[in-house]
């Protein structure tokens, strides 16, 4: 009778990460180049090699022991057969001598593991292992060579596999138990909400066919649970390795974790490992302390204590922010970097969209390096266009640079002076007037300022060297990251972006690289996932999101019918009011009369949305003067979290009043005021972005690329905010309320076509 053999597959990088790291966390070495810079650096090295050089050489080997077959695979960076030399290529910035010992040990482990696999594949008795370090600014190569016998490399490979074996056996058993439980997973309620089943079916089909789904589904049907449940049940059937639930805001993470808890994940049934990823600054236990063993007690000996923390974490399974923090501190390791490590080993990762879509995103990097079959869920996906534009935009501030230059340490003075001269030349030659803080002057540049970008690269090199010797200097570290981001985007500048200059007075210019079409950056991310489900109450029209997000051609569009009746929501249009900038003073009287009349007709809680704080404050003052008996409160500029919570707490059952808010702000979406807590909304704006030089440049670029410049730059983004704000009123099947749209343009057919059909307006 033959022995049953389980197969577990692991990437070379993951195997070496697991077995080769020792000692402290140490982030004094300059920040690593981006993935794109790394790819370009590799290509640069390969171009210098001979014609017989084999780049990106796929290698695979296995190790068997005690019923487990461990398959190790990866791609060696390059192999020169004539020299019998295998190369592992790494890119870096600054002085290589400052590289942390644990990082160098990892690189050697990877190279020697590839060497063992190569000797097996080619039947070699000896091979030269070479680490090639390319400094990306200068292009200089540093080569470190070892000629090693195949027997020595094989022994190391077997040792690594044996070190990893217990973990691999545990992982294999976990995967079987997970898939078995998910195959029998039951919906946690007796029945689906109206519309929720249709959404769940669409999400499951997306996973089954490996497609991207755009699902527009109304508020109140349970979209979070209605997408998580089908993707979890699809995991065993479609061989999904990981599921990433990506959100725009912190409350979205909480909703996802609550849904997973209802599915039993918090109690370990099914045996899912759930991880909440949070930003580094929010996870840090010692703010302002460098991430190095000499300074931070949670960095000292991090890799020595990591194995015990990792074992405890996967045994726990439920790793939301608080649970992860408690476990990390119990093992005296950094919570943030423990979370980064556990992202590789958890089944469901809940975090912000930047963890997959940002330029150097952790989850995308792991999916690529470890070969994940990944399912994506993107909540409130109507915000992804704006968020992605921010991810792929950067800005430099001349005034800040001048201030830092005055107090610069000696090693940075020369680089800062060169950059300052380039700034002055750019401002002189740009043709953009001086402007002022109140009336800034703005211009779009035809080309990137090459001299300034070059000087910026020089500053990056000097900053990297300086910070390696003087870690923890916040402003200089921040400047380095800004300069790196700007430089990376400059390398990929194209018609998806523009370069602009804004002048707010002498010595107060800002140079921006503004992304206009995030599709060029996001398309490879969607292509790398097995399936993706993007959902929101406002994803119409589908073409807008397909075009600007770079979704695959075969993406599917689904509209889930609203479970609400038109009679639940009274929608009125005041077509005799204009809220255009020039007409706003004249609009205050009719707006106040509308607010007061509705409040008298049905006293209760209302939200009134305006296009700006100035307009909001003018309307509040007019209402207070004309109707002082109507209770009111208003959103203010820069409200902190406590103030926002106090504002929402005022919408309590039993009281009444009108709350004034800015459309598109903190209270325009993502808040839940069911039942009598909110019975109506007044919207005194179409939410259109201002017709300023930037938005006009955006309109022109979108017109040239997609033929729908005004719609894509103005009308669709504005009305998405209107529909989101109106969606605060009807939150459940029993709610009833009113929405009053106050602007004559709401009566136009092209505008009405972008409003929800069930409104019956």
Image: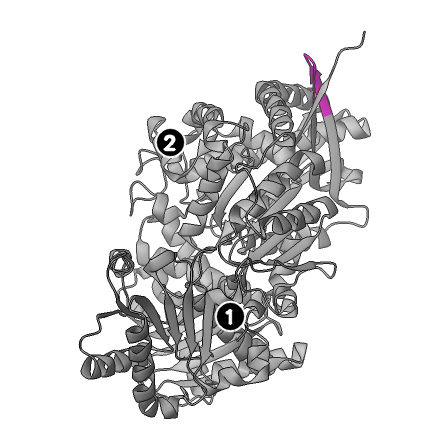
Image: 680 above or below 189? below
The prevailing secondary structure element of the residues shown in magenta is strand
In the picture, measured across the screen, residue 135 lies left or right of residue 8, that is: left
Question: Is residue 667 among what the camera can see?
Answer: yes
Mark 2 neighbour class, 10 Å CA radius: few under 14, some 14 to 19, many 20 or more: many
Q: Position of residue 447 (x, y in %)?
A: 57, 79
Q: Position of residue 212 (x, y in %)?
A: 67, 54
Q: Position of residue 350 (x, y in %)?
A: 49, 44
Mark drawn on residue 352: none
Find the distance from the CA under tag 1 to the CA under tag 2: 41 Å
Q: Please tell me which residue is depicted at 47% across the width and 49% down the height of the picture.
A: 95
Write the start and end of the magenta stretch as one range. Answer: 62-69
Mark drawn on residue 328: 2
Mark 1 neighbour class, 10 Å CA radius: few under 14, some 14 to 19, many 20 or more: many
Colour setting:
one colour
Tell me which numbered mark, 1 or 2, is placed earlier along the sequence: 2
Residue under label 1? 720
Q: Please tell me which residue is depicted at 48% across the width and 36% down the height of the picture.
A: 262
Query: How many labels were placed on the picture?
Result: 2
């Amino acid at each position: 009778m033959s022995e049953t053999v389980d197969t577990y597959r692991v990437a070379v990088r993951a195997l070496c990460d697991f077995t080769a790291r020792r000692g402290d966390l140490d982030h004094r070495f300059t920040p690593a180049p981006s993935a794109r810079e790394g790819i370009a650096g590799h290509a640069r090295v390969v171009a210098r090699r001979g014609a017989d050089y084999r780049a990106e050489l796929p290698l695979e080997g296995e190790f068997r022991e005690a019923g487990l077959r461990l398959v190790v695979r990866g791609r060696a960076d390059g192999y020169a057969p004539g020299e019998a030399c295998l190369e592992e290529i790494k890119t870096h910035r600054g002085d290589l001598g400052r590289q942390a010992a644990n990082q160098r040990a990892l690189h050697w482990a990877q190279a020697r593991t590839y060497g063992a696999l190569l000797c097996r594949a080619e039947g070699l008795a000896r091979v030269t292992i070479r680490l090639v370090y390319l400094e990306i600014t200068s292009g200089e190569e540093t080569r470190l060579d070892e000629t090693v016998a195949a027997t020595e490399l094989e022994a190391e490979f077997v040792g690594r596999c044996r070190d990893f074996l217990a973990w691999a056996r545990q992982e294999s058993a976990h995967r079987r138990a997970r898939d078995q439980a998910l195959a029998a997973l039951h919906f946690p309620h007796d029945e689906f909400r109206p519309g929720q089943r249709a959404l769940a079916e669409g999400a499951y089909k997306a996973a089954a066919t490996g497609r991207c789904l755009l699902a527009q589904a109304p508020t109140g049907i349970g979209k979070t649970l209605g997408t998580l449940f089908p993707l979890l049940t699809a995991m065993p059937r479609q061989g999904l390795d990981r599921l990433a639930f990506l959100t725009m805001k912190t409350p979205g993470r909480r909703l996802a974790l609550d849904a997973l808890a209802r599915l039993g994940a918090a109690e370990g049934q099914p045996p899912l490992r759930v991880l909440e990823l949070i930003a580094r600054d929010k996870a840090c236990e010692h703010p302002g302390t460098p991430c190095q063993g000499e300074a931070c007690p949670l960095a000292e000996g991090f890799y020595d204590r990591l194995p015990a923390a990792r074992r405890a974490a996967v045994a726990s399974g439920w790793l939301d922010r608080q649970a992860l923090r408690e476990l990390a501190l119990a093992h005296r390791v950094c919570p943030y970097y423990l979370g980064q490590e556990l992202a590789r080993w958890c089944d469901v990762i809940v975090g912000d969209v930047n963890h997959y879509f940002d330029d150097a995103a952790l989850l995308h990097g792991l999916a690529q390096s470890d070969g994940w079959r990944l399912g994506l869920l993107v909540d409130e996906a109507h915000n992804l266009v704006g968020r992605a534009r921010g991810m792929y935009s950067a800005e430099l501030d001349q005034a800040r640079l001048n201030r830092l230059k005055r107090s610069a340490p000696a090693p940075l003075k020369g680089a800062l002076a060169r950059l300052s001269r380039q700034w002055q030349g750019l401002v002189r030659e740009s043709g953009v007037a001086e402007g002022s803080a109140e009336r800034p002057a703005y211009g779009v540049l035809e080309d990137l300022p090459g001299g300034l970008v070059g000087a910026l690269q020089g500053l990056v090199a000097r900053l990297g060297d300086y910070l390696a010797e003087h870690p923890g200097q916040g402003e200089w570290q921040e400047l380095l990251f800004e300069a790196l981001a700007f430089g990376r985007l400059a390398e990929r500048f194209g018609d998806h972006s523009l370069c602009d200059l804004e002048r707010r007075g002498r010595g107060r210019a800002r140079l921006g690289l503004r992304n206009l079409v995030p599709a060029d950056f996001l398309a490879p991310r969607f292509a790398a996932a097995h399936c993706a489900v993007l959902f929101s109450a406002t994803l119409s029209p589908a073409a807008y999101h397909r075009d600007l997000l770079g979704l695959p051609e075969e993406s599917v569009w689904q509209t889930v019918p609203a479970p609400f009746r038109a009679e639940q929501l009274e929608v009125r249009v005041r077509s005799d009011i204009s809220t255009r900038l020039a007409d706003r003073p004249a609009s205050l009287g009719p707006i106040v009369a509308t607010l007061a009349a509705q409040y008298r007709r049905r006293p209760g809680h209302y939200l009134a949305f305006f296009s700006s704080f100035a307009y909001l404050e003018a309307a509040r003052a007019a209402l207070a003067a004309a109707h002082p008996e109507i209770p009111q409160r208003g959103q203010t500029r820069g409200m902190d979290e406590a103030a926002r919570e106090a504002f929402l707490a005022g919408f309590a059952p039993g009281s009444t009043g009108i709350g004034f808010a800015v459309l598109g702000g903190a209270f325009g979406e993502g808040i839940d005021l069911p039942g009598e807590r909110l019975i109506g909304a007044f919207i005194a704006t179409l939410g259109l972005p201002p017709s300023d030089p930037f938005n006009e440049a955006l309109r022109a670029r979108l017109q040239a690329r997609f033929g729908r410049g005004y719609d894509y730059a103005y009308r669709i983004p504005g009305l998405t905010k209107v529909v989101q704000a109106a969606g605060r009123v009807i939150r459940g099947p029993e709610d009833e309320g009113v929405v009053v749209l106050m602007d004559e343009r709401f009566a136009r057919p092209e505008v009405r076509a972008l409003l929800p059909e069930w409104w019956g307006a």
